[in-house]
């Protein structure tokens, strides 16, 4: 039997190298902050150049990167991996424009949702895994929208359900290389991205502002609630956990 590490050492990520996509703000920025706090060398990749200021503030390295662009993604993963390889990849970048009624959703709209939320997550997982010679941990940001349908967000729901399936399949394939792959399914979290969707969601009959605290705990979902879950999944506390979806929603789906 393996010797169990001391609990306080399990929380340290000193010496580990991490990539967080979409880390300029919202959930991604909270994840960057926690990874840095735990001692990891963190690269923040985002197409929003405000990410440079976020990285400066948090002690991370910023790479301007659209995750759908193969060259930019490859360059970001290279920076994150350094010479000795990557240990942690958090595939957090995602978009969630309101679909509206499915009968009027265009093919271009659906294709863009899948391009960013599915295809680019697959590519980033592949590029990360190819730079994890010592094993590692990948966390994909799914959503509770993957677990149950919702009117007005059908393209988003489909994209996040694909992330869940991809997570399970990659976990099975990468397990023999010591790479764990898990997903987090956040409930409604108060982020700039959600704030930007309040009006279109209301028009679709979803009062997202009310839903932010509509859970048994009655607490508004904050980015750090999700970051804490990421810390669990990337740490050795989760050494025997792979291919799973951790729901963090204040009990909204209980
Ligand atoms: N906030 C929520 O309620 C909620 C709930 C469930 C899941 N999620 C998921 O969590 C993740 C983060 O959500 P958030 O609310 O923090 O979003 P946000 O919009 O506040 O931040 C997302 C970040 O990703 C970046 N990004 C978007 N497209 C990109 C691309 N092509 N390349 C690089 N960066 C890109 C944005 O510039 C932004 O900085 C998303 O995948 C989202 O689907 C959020």
Image (spheres, grey):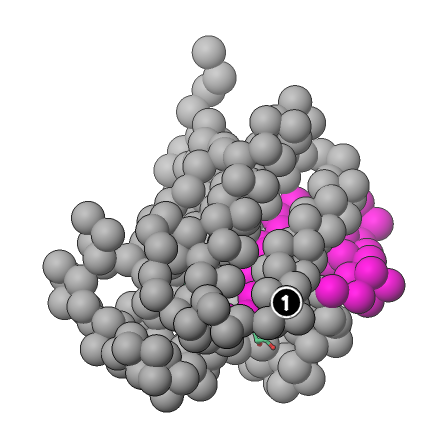
Q: Based on the picture, tell me whether residue 215 belongs to the magenta stretch.
A: no
Q: What is the secondary structure assignment of the residue under circle 1?
A: helix
Whether label 1 lies within 8 Å of ligand 1 gets the answer no
- Residue at x 59% of width, y 27% of height: 172
Residue stretch in magenta: 68-96
Q: Position of residue 33 (x, y in %)?
A: 50, 68
- Residue at x 63% of width, y 86% of height: 50
In the image shown, does 129 or 170 lie closer to the viewer?
170
- Residue at x 42% of width, y 42% of height: 245
Task: Using the image, determine if residue 159 lies above or below residue 5.
Answer: below
In the image shown, does 192 or 222 lie closer to the viewer?
192
Q: Residues within 10 Å of mark 1 (few under 14, many from 20)?
A: few
Q: Based on the picture, tell me whether residue 92 belongs to the magenta stretch.
A: yes
Q: Which residue is mark 1?
A: 107
Q: Is residue 161 visible?
A: yes
Left or right of residue 181: residue 189: left
Task: Using the image, determine if residue 229 lies above or below residue 30.
Answer: above
Q: Is residue 85 visible?
A: no
Determine which quarter of the picture holds residue 129: top right
Left or right of residue 220: residue 170: right
In the image shown, does 200 or 103 lie closer to the viewer?
103
- Residue at x 69% of width, y 77% of height: 47
Q: Position of residue 24 (x, y in %)?
A: 58, 76
Determine which quarter of the picture holds residue 85: top right
Q: Residue furthest top?
A: 1
Q: Position of residue 93 (x, y in %)?
A: 59, 65
Q: Residue furthest front?
A: 103
Q: Position of residue 97 (x, y in %)?
A: 50, 75
Left or right of residue 64: residue 1: left
Left or right of residue 242: residue 213: left
């Amino acid at each position: 039997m393996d010797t169990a590490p001391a609990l306080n050492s399990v929380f340290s990520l000193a010496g580990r190298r991490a990539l967080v996509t979409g880390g300029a703000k919202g959930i991604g920025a909270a994840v960057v902050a926690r990874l840095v706090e735990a001692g990891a060398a963190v690269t923040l990749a985002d197409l929003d150049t405000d990410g440079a200021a976020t990285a400066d503030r948090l002690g991370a390295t910023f790479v301007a990167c659209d995750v759908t662009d193969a060259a930019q993604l490859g360059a970001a993963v290279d920076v994150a991996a350094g010479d000795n390889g990557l240990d942690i990849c958090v595939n957090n970048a995602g978009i969630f424009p309101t679909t509206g009624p499915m009968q009027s959703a265009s093919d271009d709209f659906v294709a863009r949702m899948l391009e960013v939320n599915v295809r680019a997550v697959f590519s980033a997982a592949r590029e990360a895994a190819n730079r994890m010679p010592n094993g590692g941990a990948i966390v994909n940001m799914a959503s509770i929208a993957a677990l149950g349908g919702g009117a007005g967000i059908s393209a988003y729901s489909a994209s996040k359900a694909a992330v869940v399936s991809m997570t399970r399949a990659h976990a099975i394939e990468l397990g023999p290389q010591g790479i764990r792959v898990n997903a987090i399914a956040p409930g409604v979290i108060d982020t700039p991205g959600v704030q930007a969707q309040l009006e279109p969601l209301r028009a679709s009959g979803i009062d997202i502002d009310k839903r932010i605290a509509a859970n048994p705990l009655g607490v508004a979902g904050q980015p750090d609630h999700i970051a804490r879950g990421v810390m669990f999944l990337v740490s050795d506390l989760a050494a025997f956990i792979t291919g799973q979806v951790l729901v963090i929603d204040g009990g909204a789906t209980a």
